[in-house]
Image (cartoon, rainbow, N blue to C red):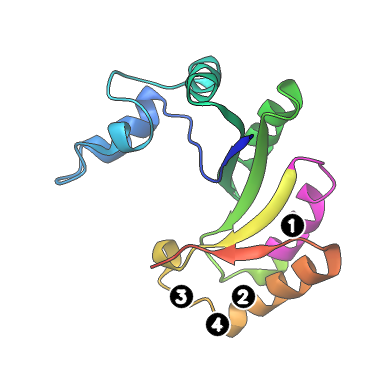
Amino acid sequence: MDIFDIWVNLVTEQSAEQFVTQEGYENIPGYLGSNSGPVGVDSLLAIMDELGVATGVFTGGLDRNTDKLLDICTAHPGRFLVAGGIGDPSRPGRQVKRVREFAQHPAFCMVRVMPLASQVPTNDARHYPVYQVCEELGLPAGRNAA
């Protein structure tokens, strides 16, 4: 049986530093997969292999990082997919454009609406254009549970 991990993360010194300097966030690197330092692509693949995870899904914001994550998918075919995250629904036209662009890549698998990041409910009308383009393109649109 292949294991599918719906949210894998690359942890760099810089990204870990953004979290661990905040009070109460000291354990974030461990939650993201490492208690001993950064987790780059090779380290993440080794962890996935050790745990029997065949495919992992990255979540990148539609306005940042998704291009880089898709490049990693291209370099490691079949090991990773990418979910585009909607953190800021205030520019739905831009979000729709980005979904259309990223949907051209075979590793772009879904869109995640992230109300915890934006404090905008999933049923807010600002999300409707994204839901519509996902339906048109046959992409699932999911949400992070509260």
Q: Label 1 amino acid?
A: Val
Whether residue 58 appears in this view of the structure is yes
Q: Label 2 amino acid?
A: His
Q: Label 4 amino acid?
A: Asn
First in residue order: circle 1 vs circle 3: 1
Q: Where residue 46 sits: x, y (%)?
A: 51, 16
The C terminus is located in which quarter? bottom left
Check whether the beta carbons of the residues at disc 3 and disc 4 lie within 8 A of each other.
no
Q: Identify residue for label 3.
A: 120
Q: Is residue 83 left or right of residue 48?
A: right
Which residue of the protein is positioned furthest toward the left in this rendering?
A: 23
Q: Quadrant of residue 130?
A: bottom right
Q: Secondary structure at mark 3?
A: loop
Residue plotted at (63% across, 35% down): 1
Is residue 105 inside the magenta stretch?
A: yes
Report crowding for label 1: few under 14, some 14 to 19, many 20 or more residues within 10 A (C-alpha).
Answer: many
Check whether the beta carbons of the residues at disc 2 and disc 4 lie within 8 A of each other.
yes
First in residue order: circle 2 vs circle 3: 3
First in residue order: circle 2 vs circle 1: 1
Report crowding for label 4: few under 14, some 14 to 19, many 20 or more residues within 10 A (C-alpha).
Answer: few
Report crowding for label 2: few under 14, some 14 to 19, many 20 or more residues within 10 A (C-alpha).
Answer: many
Residue plotted at (82% across, 41% down): 106
Q: Where residue 59 sits: x, y (%)?
A: 56, 46
The magenta segment: 94-107
Disc nearest the viewer among 2 and 4:
4
C-alpha separation, residue under disc 2 versus residue under disc 3? 9 Å
Q: Identify residue for label 1.
A: 99
Q: Identify residue for label 4.
A: 123
C-alpha separation, residue under disc 2 versus residue under disc 1? 13 Å
Q: Identify residue for label 2.
A: 127
C-alpha separation, residue under disc 3 versus residue under disc 4? 8 Å
Check whether the beta carbons of the residues at disc 2 and disc 3 lie within 8 A of each other.
yes
